[in-house]
Image (cartoon, grey):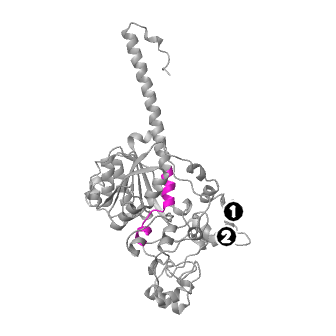
Amino acid sequence: MCNKNVSASMLADIMSVSKRTIESWNKNGKITALKNGEYALNNLKHFPQIQAMLESNWEKDLRITAMKPYRSIELFAGAGGLAIGLEKAGFNAVVLNEIDKNACNTLRYNRPDWHVVEGDISHVDFSYYQDIDFVSGGFPCQAFSYAGNKLGFEDTRGTLFFEFSRVIKEIQPKVFLAENVRGLLSHDKGKTLATIRSVIHELGYTLIEPKILKAIFYRVPQKRERLFLVGIRNDLVEHANFSWPEPYSRVLTLADALKKGELYQTDCPASQGQVYPKRKKEILELIPPGGCWVDLPDDIQKEYMQKSYFLGGGKTGMARRLSYDNPSLTLTCAPAQKQTERCHPTETRPLTIREYARIQTFPDDWTFTGSVSSQYKQIGNAVPVNLAYAMGQKLIELLNGIEQNLSVEQTLLNQHNNVEHIYRDNKNNGDHPSILVACPS
């Protein structure tokens, strides 16, 4: 059941606005805070995000199971965040392709039975793989060149989206899933997404309207957002019925990630991690949980921020300490970067490898290989496992519906053919065809 009350900062996360906006809404009467400063969700049902959480069918989605073993291929597989979630939902990966050596070793170490093809996707012939139901992957978004072009398949040559679409063209899966950063929606003033739409149409697929999913709604204690694109082969569209995953009934926090509770059965185990230089640690000691550089004395702000102190904008990622009471900020490829600090909520240090992994909802037994910096990068680039699982459940539901409708259609076709066969036999034997009044059972 959804939490009855939430803090102003948590409500801001749910509504995708700033805490200052929430305070403004409360001041002008748009919403009303309780005496303790929290907000009762039952009083906010007029907001679609709140209503969706209060009326969630999350438990129903958990009962979705695959009608048959759906064969899949994953491209740009990374360290396996998407693959683990899809596997849990019911997909059977035939092959996973990834260029990063350490990420490939991570996949092989944890899933020796997975067929991991290491190397540049442009050098891999996927036409060998047949009867593939599903292709997935998060292709890196590169700029396309538009001068004198027609925004078609060939226009994307040289980009990794071209390779993604080439695989779709070679394999012709029933369904595909592409994920990317939310910025793809507006990249190059919308031209990039327009090209992608055009290519998908050219390949013979119908694109479901792309949607940004916020990880906090899918049992991920992190404010990560990803853009998802689902394509269905045109000959199957009439048999398909897709719906996006239902939100979970509450937003999980950093405490859910790092402490024993709903997500994990133990506190976060110890692991390797980066360390701060002496002076940086002294400065970050002054930052409270949930705070950032603005909480420092002015002279130390100038020392730490240097030229950035005089620039506009909030720059709230700098000298940022996380809070147990809220979801984590979106993880980057390194937890101690000055512009995107991710300091532990109560200890003055960067998040460790295992803490990073938990915030991305990797299982504790999923081991990462390579240097510490490589492990941070693998985790930071991953799709959160629980978000992938939520999407996977709805994709399994989509494929189940296609299979069921095709089966019904084939049954009706067989019955029709049987009737035609009996009709011809009776006619050849001199019997009157009007005796055929019903399909045989």
What segment carries the magenta color?
376-393
Image: 337 above or below 61: below
Q: Nearer the viewer, residue 239 or 407?
A: 407
Whether residue 378 appears in magenta in the rendering, the answer is yes
Specify the label residue 26 is tagged with: 2
Of tags 2 and 1, which is closer to the observer? 1
Q: In which quadrant of the rendered view does residue 262 lie?
A: bottom right
Q: From the viewer's perspective, is 438 left or right of 147?
A: right
Q: In this view, does 154 lie to the left or right of 323?
A: left
Residue at screen point 47% across, 71% down: 331
Q: First in sequence: mark 2 or mark 1?
A: 1
Q: Which mark is residue 4?
A: 1
Q: What element carries label 2?
A: helix
Residue nearest the viewer, comparing 40 with 280: 280
Residue 192: image location, x then y, percent: 36, 60
Crowding around mark 1 (Cα neighbors within 10 Å: few <14, some 14 to 19, many 20+) is: few
136 in magenta: no
